[in-house]
Image (cartoon, rainbow, N blue to C red):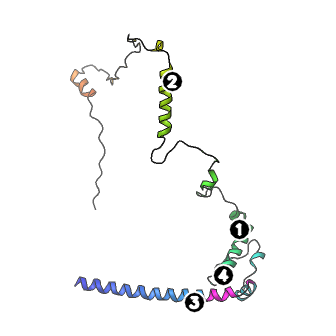
């Protein structure tokens, strides 16, 4: 029984989606036909037909919402928006908080005749090998008198002592209590369980 109900509900949804798609297609065809008619007319004729002011003559505070209708061609909409951005300093000036406002293309930051030791797939391998070869050559050129003697040099730095947590001895404290305090358990991680 549930399978039949699922089938019919899916079928009903599919029929509804087809109907909506047909409506959208018809709307797009009418808009395309309207745009084709408007493309043949000049901007002045379109403005008088739609009762819109000249976008280049807009002043601060004028309403631009009429240019945002679907019937207005894109070229007139862009002209009106350009004029709006020039009139309003808030829209004209970028505040610097735009994440991608900078030019991050290679052309903006490439230095002419840039040379690098990086090799794709190998990294800086050749550069590191060249530095190692130079280090070996300089090591070979040093006189033998600079070789270290066989006598070990005594290291005068004292060995670091392990820090032990001091437990204040109170009267009546036993050595077992001190050992338990020194061997305190390590902190455990909290575990959360959610039901639902």
Q: Which mark is residue 73?
A: 4
Comparing 103 with 80, the one in front is: 103
- Give the class, few, some or many, for how many residues have Cα within 10 Å of label 4's Cα (few <14, many ≥20): some
Q: Is residue 142 above or below residue 182?
A: above
Determine whether the residue tagged by mark 1 lies in a helix, strand or loop: helix
Which quadrant of the figure contains the C terminus? bottom left
Verify CB contact (< 8 Å) between mark 2 and mark 3.
no
Q: Is residue 91 above or below residue 22?
A: above
Q: Position of residue 32 (x, y in %)?
A: 59, 86
User: Spatial distance from mark 1 to mark 3, Cα to Cα?
Assistant: 31 Å
Residue at figure coordinates x 42%, y 85% from the top left: 17
Q: Position of residue 119 (x, y in %)?
A: 49, 45
User: Spatial distance from mark 3 to mark 4, Cα to Cα?
Assistant: 14 Å
User: Spatial distance from mark 2 to mark 4, Cα to Cα?
Assistant: 75 Å
Per the rendered image, the range of residues in magenta is: 33-43
Q: Which mark is residue 173?
A: none
Instruction: Tell me which corner region of the image, top left, top right, bottom left or bottom right, holds residue 39.
Output: bottom right
Is residue 79 at all visible to an observer of this figure?
A: yes
Image depth: mark 4 or mark 1 in front: 4
Nearest to N terminus: mark 4 or mark 1: 4
- Give the number of marks: 4
- Residue to which mark 3 is pinned: 30
- Residue to which mark 2 is pinned: 138
Verify CB contact (< 8 Å) between mark 3 and mark 4.
no
- Residue to which mark 1 is pinned: 85
Comparing 187 with 10, the one in front is: 10
Image depth: mark 1 or mark 3 in front: 3
């Amino acid at each position: 029984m549930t399978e039949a109900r699922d089938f019919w509900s899916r079928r009903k949804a599919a029929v509804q989606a087809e109907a909506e798609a047909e409506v959208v297609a018809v709307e797009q065809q009418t808009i395309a036909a309207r745009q084709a008619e408007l493309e043949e007319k000049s901007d002045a004729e379109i403005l008088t037909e739609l009762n819109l002011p000249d976008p280049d003559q807009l002043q601060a505070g004028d309403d631009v919402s009429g240019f945002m209708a679907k019937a207005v061609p894109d070229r007139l909409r862009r002209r009106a928006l350009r004029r709006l951005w020039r009139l309003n300093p808030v829209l004209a000036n970028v505040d610097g908080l735009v994440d991608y406002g900078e030019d991050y293309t290679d052309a903006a930051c490439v230095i002419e005749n840039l040379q690098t030791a990086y090799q794709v797939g190998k990294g800086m391998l050749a550069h590191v090998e060249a530095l190692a070869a130079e280090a070996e050559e300089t090591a070979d050129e040093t006189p033998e008198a600079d070789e270290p003697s066989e006598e070990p040099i005594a290291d005068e730095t004292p060995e670091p002592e392990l820090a032990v947590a001091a437990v204040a001895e109170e009267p009546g404290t036993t050595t077992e209590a001190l050992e338990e305090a020194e061997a305190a358990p390590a902190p455990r991680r909290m575990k959360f369980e959610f039901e639902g």
